[in-house]
Structure formats: C-alpha cells, structure tokens
Amino acid sequence: MNPPTTSSKARVLIVDDSPTMRSILQKELGSDAGIEIVGTAVDAYEAKDKIIQYDPDVITLDIEMPRMDGLTFLKLIMERRPRPVIILSSLSTPASDKAMEAHKLGAFEVFAKPCGEFSLADLGPLLRQSIKEAKIKYTQKQPSATPHISTTTPARLPSINKNVCLKSILLLGASTGGTEALKDVFLQLPEHIPPILVVQHIPAHFSTAFANRLNSLCPFEVKEAEDGDGVRPDRALIAPGNFHMTLEPKGSQFVVRLNNGPKIWHQRPAVDILFKSAARLKIHTMVAAVLTGMGKDGADGLLELKHAGCRTFSQDEKSSVVYGMPRAAWEIGASEKQVPLDLMAHTLMNAIG
C-alpha cells in the first residue's frame, strides 16, 4: 500500500468492519488492471487517517460499522475531503432507508452486498465499472462529485389538461445519480400528471424505499410497481429491483408486467426493456427521457421510441453525475435534445402538451 502517486488506475480505499467482506472486495477489485487497492480500514476512525495518508480516488463504505456509522462518516467526508463514495449495504428494510439517505448525502452509488440471489458475480462487474467512472469524475473535479443538497423546494409546474393526461404516458430511465435526479424532476411536476413509468437501476428492496420516499414528497401517487398494476394519470410506477418492467395493453387501458428475464447491460430492471415494449404500442402521446447513469442502457430503446413518433430527450453532460447513458442516447441520434436537469420537468410537460 503506497502513498498517493499520479496514476491512471482508480485508487480505492475499502472501509468495512467485516474481515470477510474486506477480503472479498480486495480480491474482486484487485483483479482489475484499472483498479489499485491503496488501503483497507475497519472503521471510520482508521479510514480517516488512511484518507489523509493515501488520498484515494474512491472509497467503498459500509453503512453498519462500530464507533461511527457509515452515514455519519459519509457526511464528514463530503464536508471535509469530498470525493466519490460508493456505499455497500445489506438488503434489509432499515438498510434500504439508509441507502436512500446516502444518496441524499452525496454517495456516488449504492450497491447491495452479496446475499442470497444477489451474488458476487452480480456485484463485481457493476462495482468495478462504478469505481472507474467515479475515478474519472474525481479527476475532473466535477461539482457533481460532491453532494447537491437544495435549500429550497422548487416551484411546481401548472397542471396540464386532464384529457391530455388520459392520452399520454411519460417514460424515464436512469442509473448512477438517478435517485436524486428523479427526485428533482418529480418535485417540479404538477399536482395532476399523466402516467409515469420509471426504470432506475437499483437493487432489490432498495426500490421500495425509493418509491416510498418519492411518494412522501409528491402530491400524486408514487409506488413500486406490482405485476398487473394499472397505468393511469396521477400515478408514477417505479420498476422493482431485480425485475424488468414492460408496458402492455389490457382492453382499452394499459398495465405493467414484471418478469425476471435475462439481464440487459448487466441490469435488471433495464431501461431498454421498458422503452422497447412501449415503442410497439399505439399511444396518442409518449414522451421519454434518459437521465444520468453509467453505460448504454436506454439508448436503443429511446431510438425505437423516436422512430415510433415519441418525443425523446436526454440529460445534458454538465448536470449528469455520470454522462454515460445520456451520451449513448445522444450519439446514436435517439435524443432530440439535451436538457439540463433543472429544466427537464418543464421540457417534458411542454412536450406532453
């Protein structure tokens, strides 16, 4: 473990009180030629000294630790030595709530620890990719690498015509940074909205806490989707972690269907699955957007929606935590316009009518 040097590798500090988890992460991350483990720590106090000593590009951080919990330490990091922090959390309900709080405090990403059906084989590729993306953000010293905590509640847009709501559907996809980006968009939406379907890359169980959090903030209903849920105005459905979500007709209405088919782009749920299912349907007005996130998920589906006559948008680079998914959509011509996050809600509502 060496002091800081100029390196193209992502230099990582692992903070976890479990010797087993530290060993697993060291082996899994150390096998990647683009990642260097500069140190490990059993708690926040040891980690504080090693941050000063090694100046890591990225920190992986457990939430449940002795002496000082991970959320308290995350807040201190962001206040005193800001850099990308990737949270590793268990799949319990209390941990899911804490994971959502971690996003609010500025965590770059939150992953579930390997447990049950979610194995190390699932976590490894996603964690390595996230670390390397985080290294890029830290090197660039982008403001979005530090937490964005708004001190004011944005004004809601005026409601649109009820008949327009009945004939329209809004589709959104996001990954890294998406939980906060979606919250920002939802807080600006009017009280009465067209149906909204959302795919956010998120672990199983975490999606419940995410949907509940948005529901507590919005005047319309936000819920984690269940198989067969009706698609209707004043309701936003969030795809549950570990399930793809599709849009299907049922009589004169539409419902969502859930399935645990193969992962797309290492993800389940995948944005492409939802977007492509919607592109095949005859809906009066569809508007879709790809928000911040790693990888290319959503780009192909957004292009199919555009070819089907849908209005399509993507988040701009400056306001994205990770300009991966929006870039992919823009570069293949799937997005008609790149939009700053603070103007996304206004743009989407204007496109709907």
Image (spheres, rainbow, N blue to C red):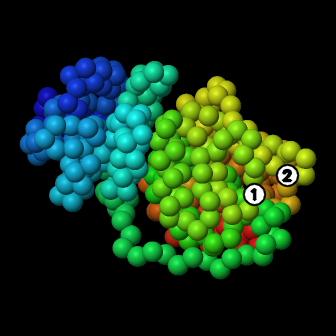
Please report the residue visible at 31 percent of the width from the left and 31 percent of the height from the top: 35
Q: Residues within 10 Å of mark 2 (few under 14, many from 20)?
A: few
Whether residues under marks 2 and 1 lie with C-beta atoms below 8 angstroms apart, the answer is: yes
- Judge whether residue 277 can be spotted in this image: yes
Please report the residue visible at 60 percent of the width from the left and 51 percent of the height from the top: 223
Residue 336 vertical position relative to residue 28 in the rendered view, above or below:
below
Q: Secondary structure at mark 1?
A: loop
Q: Nearer the viewer, residue 243 or 310?
A: 243
* Image coords of residue 33 (percent x, y): 34, 26
Q: Nearer the viewer, residue 276 or 199?
A: 199
Indicate the quadrant containing the C terminus: top left, top right, bottom left or bottom right: bottom right
Q: Which mark is residue 19?
A: none
Q: Nearer the viewer, residue 124 or 257?
A: 257
Tag 1 residue:
232
Tell me the quarter of the picture where residue 22 sits.
Answer: top left
Tag 2 residue:
253
